[in-house]
Amino acid sequence: MISRGFCTQDTSMRRASLAVAVVTALLAGGIAEAARTGKGSDAKRIEIVQSRPAGHPIMAVVSLGNQRVTIYDAIGWIMRAPVSSGRKGYETPAGIYSVIQKEVEHYSNLYDDGYMPFMQRITWSGIALHGGPLPGYAASHGCVRMPVEFAERIFDLTRIGMRVIVARNDPVPVEFRHPVLLGLDPARVGSGEPAAEGSAASDLGVLGPAKPVQTLRSLAAAKAAAAAAAIKKADAARLNAVQKTGEASRIAAALHLAESTKSRIELRVRAAQSALESADSPAAIQLAENAKADALARLADAEVRLTAAGLAAQGKPDVMRARREAEAAEAEKEAAVEAAAEAARKAAPVSVFISRKTQRLYARQSFQPIFDIAVTIRDPDHPIGTHIFTALDYIHEGADIRWSAASMDPKSEEDRSSATREPGHRFYRSTEPTPKPAGTAGSALERLVIPREAIDRISELVSPGSSLIVSDEGISSETGNHTDFVVLMSGEPQGGIKMRRRNPDFLHRYYRPYGIFWR
């Protein structure tokens, strides 16, 4: 089991500590002997596409049969390397996952504090991708070990939420178009003419040609820019109110000072006049006259200052107006920030899962459930398979989305024995995975009848990175707070899940995954 932690992307200080830790892990795993015999050459089996720049990874496919992981972007594969999955009794469960946590340096809290560099968690119970020793066969306690160099490279490329498929075979995502997916695209619902009655598109309410629309990402960017402008405006309005309040305070203080100064000097004038009236000698009279003259001169100067302060007070800033403007700008800022946050939430990829087992459609976004609803699957007693459809990128100025499809095949007799071969029987395969025909995936979609309200809701949220999973399976109990859908293949060994302890207060158990529709 691996403990929770936080993703740390600092790469500047890692290599020295990693070197010591990796050597220790290799010696502990018995790989030193393999290195002496020329078998420890995992790095040489790392393949990187050279014909084009690598795009952002959207999917990792782990082939248990081939003991290999392949990383795909929106165009095709970009990197692949050998792996070591769970050994017999601790098998890495075949299924559909996503990256839910990343940590550069991690240590197992179950298996002898084992070092797990560049850990990318795919279940909260402890299954992860990470760097580690590769003896040439399935040897882990359920995790997927990769060459450390490869694990580091993809760690810096991947993001939380990247889809991870663990399969007996080696499914290859291929570009795919279908009326059901067309119905999920933005702006394909609510415009144009209805599709032909009785077709799969008609069942979905898919309509005719669409007009170019603003994408969710561009809308989120626009809302973010508007929020930034509103924040800047609110800051300026607040600063203006503060400045005007300060200026008004200075003017009021100057007026008060001028008034009080004039009052004090008027008292001095009256005192000088009284002294003059009571003087009884030429010297006293002269002294009193001088004091009165000085007081009168000061009074004249004070009156000038008071007049100037009075004129300034007449033109003092409208503090109340400035404060009202600042309050209004603050309210605009809060609304813009909230709108930007909502737009960003809607721009996050949405995951849709349709289960033949439960006859329901489930939707999640940002690792949280958003709704579920009953669906109709034609021939419900006939298996439909497990298929993953992934939105790759926008086309036609945002009116459509380019999709890929990948299907997971039932395991063959050869596959049943290959992943659990005994130590010393290396079986890395260098053959290129063969894309499967799209007919099976298309046939699965043809059997779906999805309610109109679900289509409308999904089409509002779908964006590149979104996915549709159709499967005979139900939702695994591994699905929970802060996870995407976890779907485990029944009939496949799941020792890597079953052998892991769970704390009684396990926070991520999924007691009730969904509420009432739209709630």
Image (cartoon, rainbow, N blue to C red):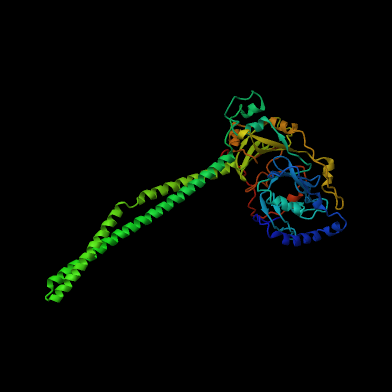
Above or below: residue 6 compared with residue 59:
below
Looking at the image, which is closer to me, 205 or 31? 31
Looking at the image, which is closer to me, 60 or 504? 60
Left or right of 342 in this view: 45: right
The answer to whether residue 299 shows anywhere in this view is: yes
The answer to whether residue 70 shows anywhere in this view is: no
Q: Position of residue 165 (x, y in %)?
A: 73, 44
Q: Can you tell which quarter of the image residue 451 is in? A: top right
For this orientation, the residue located farthest to the top is 197
Q: Position of residue 324 (x, y in %)?
A: 39, 48
Left or right of 252 in this view: 161: right
Instruction: Report the residue at 35% width, 51% height from top.
Output: 317
| Count of numbered circles on the image | 0
Q: Position of residue 319 (x, y in %)?
A: 36, 51
Above or below: residue 387 compared with residue 11:
above
Looking at the image, which is closer to me, 445 or 437? 437
Left or right of 340 in this view: 408: right
Instruction: Report the residue at 29% width, 52% height from top.
Output: 314
Above or below: residue 93 compared with residue 468:
below
Looking at the image, which is closer to me, 515 or 50? 50
Q: Quadrant of the N terminus?
A: bottom right
Q: Quadrant of the C terminus?
A: top right
Q: Position of residue 272 (x, y in %)?
A: 18, 69
For this orientation, the residue located farthest to the left is 280
Q: Can you tell which quarter of the image residue 177 is in? A: top right
